[in-house]
Structure formats: structure tokens, C-alpha cells
Image (cartoon, rainbow, N blue to C red):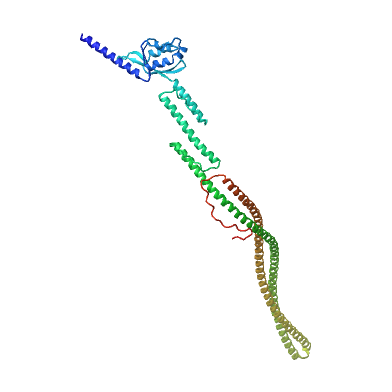
Amino acid sequence: IGALARSMDVIYRTGLATAQLKSALDCLDTRIMVADQDNVITYMNGNLINMFQRGEADIRKQIPGFEAGKLLGSNFDLFHKDPAHQQRIVGGLNKTHAGRIVLGGRTVMLVANPVKNPLGARIGTVVEWRDLTVEQRVQAEIDEVLAAAKRGELERRVVAQYAQGDLKKLADSMNALIAMVAEVTGEVGSMVASLADGDLTRRIEQDYQGSFGQLKDNANRTAEKLAAIVAEIRLASEEVENAAGEINAGTEDLAGRTEQAASNLEETAASMEEMSATVKQNAENAQNAAQLAEGANGVAAKGGRIVGEAVTAMARIESSSQKIADIIGVIDEIAFQTNLLALNASVEAARAGEAGKGFAVVASEVRALAQRSAQAAGDIKALIQDSGGQVKDGVRLVNQAGESLTEIVGAIGQVTSIIGEISLASREQAAGVEEINGSVTSLDEMTQQNSALVEESAAAARGLGEQAAKLAELMGFFKLATAAAPPPARQASRPAGQPGR
């Protein structure tokens, strides 16, 4: 009796736990089906039964004779096209298995888990049914709305009247997001349209959070910055217009002065060309003079050499005259001795008497000849002495002439050197004048080009003034909240032709 009581208690407790488990499964939002080890359906909670009842008509199109109320006690293989395959999967089920089936046009996800006894043997299967049809419809609509939003079509919304729970919240959140994006883009688009129309006073006043708030702030800051830039451009365009007027006046003045400078440079270039020709002619004349001076220097040097030779010849003549004088002296002494001998011969002849008369005559004649020779030798000696004095004077004069010629040669050499330096300086001066002439010519060409550039600058300044006026006209298209401050006062433009610093 005790064992029976304990068994009854276990049965009672098991039944109570089973009842509690059934009650808990009935309260779940999920759809639960329990089958035994032969795949016979032993339990379905209310949500699953309601799902089958709502789709009963659609399911009959796929499974003829289907009735939701007769599912308990039937085999769940009726939901599968290949029961044998399903039995193999369930028979070897040791862990969670998930799969999808299409049932009456509805997509259903099945999550199956094995039910085991305390010994670990499988005694059944519990299957969770999830109807993904509504989720797929909502997801499809969300995808369509997002695709339309990507194309810029923000008027589309998710139709979520059939969605429940989290799906409805997701659809409502998506619609709210699209509406918020549409509102923000509408505000920004309206403000951009106002900017395009030139109205820079439009601002976004609605309060937004996060990135939308940043977009609002950035758009407003952009409009404010653009308004400030347009105001500054207005002021700058007015200043540019004034500056263009001044540039135009100054450029015309500069054009006049540049033209005058070009004319002066042209005259200077002509004068430099004449001066260059004159300096070149002087350089050629100096070079010719240097050549003539070099020739004269050579002739003078040759004359100096000839004078030197003449001095040497005169010295030899003087030496010869001295030798002749010595010879005449010897002859004079011979004549004197002869005279003495003749006188002694006369004395001896006189002593000899008649025998010595002939010898006396000869001695007399010899004496006469000796006297005549002595007289002639004296005359020759006097002449030679006079000739020697004249030769000495000639030698002295020739020496003086040689010294003068030497000085002349030195002077001619100095003159030749000076003329060479003058010729070199003339050539350098000619080259310098030629370079100056080229520089002046280049300067004249550059001045002509500058004159042309100044004329182009004047035309550009006039164009700049026109563009500045056009810019001011374009800036007048924009509407600003406050009028731009007037430009600072500037000096009046200098009249054309007035000299500047």
C-alpha cells in the first residue's frame, strides 16, 4: 500500500507538473507543437491552433481536407512533401534543427528540438512554429520604402496596419524616420531654393537633434557665411570699380610718359649710333697711327744703328789720322836727319875742295829736297792735325747725333706705346659704345613693348571697371538682412597726364 501510495504521489506530481507545463506553454506568445517518438502530434498551444485556423482555407489549397481541429493525434508528416526524409532528420535529432516550409502561401520557419527522458533517450519532439509571412511583407515594404528614399522619393510609407508587436514598432519607426528626413530635406530644400532666388535671409527655425541638428546648423551657418561673403563682395566690387578708375587714369598717364620716353630713347639710340660710328672711326685712325708710329720707331731704330756705325767709322778714321800723323812725324824726322846729313856732306865737300864740288852740288840738292820734304811733311802734318780736329769734332757731333737719335728712338717708343694704349682704349671705347648702343636699342625695344603693354593695361583696366560694375550689378541680385556698409573713402583719381612719383 505504501509503494502504491508513493507511485500515486509520483503520478500526481507528474500530472501536476504536466498540467503546469501545458498551462505555461498555452500562455506563450510562441507557437508550440509537441509530438511523440512516432511523430504523432500530442500537443499544440493556443497560438499555434489560432494560426492554423486563420490559414485553414489557404492550407487546404496545398493540403486537401486539412482541418485545424483534427491535427491532434495526427502525424506531422502531412506537412512535408518527403515524409521519409523528415523522419530520418527527426529520428536522428540530437540538437536544434531549423528549416522553412511554404504552407498555403505562408512562409513558416520550424525549429525542432529533441525531447529526452532522464536516461537520455528521445521520447518525442518539440517544434516551434514561426510565421514569417508578416515579417517578410513588412521587410519587403521597408525595402521598397528605403529604395524609394534612395531615389529621393520621401513620400512613400510602410503600410503596417496588419503588423503586430515589434514589427508594428519597426514600421512606425521607419515611417517616422522617413517623415523626419522628408521634413529636414524639405526645410533645407526650401532654404536652398531661397538662396537660389537670391534671398539670403531665409533660415531653418525648427528644432532638430543629432545629425539633423548639425545639418540645420550647417545650413544656417552656410547661409550666414554666404550673406557675409556677398556683402564683402559688394564692398569689394565697389572698391574694385574705384581702383579700376584710378588704375585706368594712372595707366593712361603712364602710357603718355612711356610714349615720350620711347621717343626720347629713339632719339638717344640714333645719337648713340652716330657716336658709335665716330668712335669706331677714331679707333681705326688710332690703330693706323699706332701702325705708323711703329714704322717710324723701326726707321728711327735703324737710323740709330747707322749713326752708331758712323761713329765707329769716324773712330777708325780718327785712329787712321793719328797713325798718318805719326808717319808724317817719322818722315819729318827723316827729312831733318837728311838735311843734317846733307849739311855735313856740304861741309865735307867744302873741305874736299875741287874734288868735292860735285858731291857738294848733290848734297845741296839733297838738302833742298830734305827741306822741301820737311816743309811738305809739316804742311801735311798741319793738315792732318786740322783734319784730326775736324774728325774729333765730327765724332763728337756724330756721338751727339747718336745720343739724340737714341733719345728720339726712346721718345718714338713711348709715343708708339701711348698710341697703342690710345688705340686699345679706342677699341675698348668703341666696343663699350657698341654695347651701350645695343643696350639702348634693347631698351628702346623694351620701352616700345612696355608702351604696348601699358596700352593693353589701360584697356584691361577699362575692362576691369566694366567687370566691376557688372559684378556690382550681379551682387544686387542678392537680398541681405542688413545693408552693407559703404566702402571707405578713397582719393580722387589722378587726371590723365599728371606726372606721378
Residue 437 visible to the viewer: no
User: Does residue 454 appear anywhere in the picture?
Assistant: yes
Q: Is the residue 271 above or below the residue 184 in the image?
A: below
Question: Does residue 113 appear left or right of residue 406 in this picture?
Answer: left
Residue 168 location, quadrant: top left
377 left or right of 11 in image: right
Work out which quarter of the rendered image holds the C terminus and state it.
Answer: bottom right
Q: Position of residue 34 (x, y in %)?
A: 36, 14
The location of residue 489, given as percent across then percent down, is 55, 56
Q: Quadrant of the N terminus?
A: top left
Horizontal and vertical percent position of residue 424: 65, 63
The image quadrant that residue 395 belongs to is bottom right
Indicate whether 208 appears above or below 439: above
Write the residue at 23% across / 9% down. Answer: 4
323 vs 90, nearest the viewer? 90
- Residue 198 drawn above or below residue 58: below
- Depth check: 273 or 497 in front? 497
Nearer to the camera, 209 or 329: 209
425 on left or right of 134: right
Q: In terms of image quadrants, where is residue 274?
A: bottom right
Where residue 426 sits: x, y (%)? 66, 63
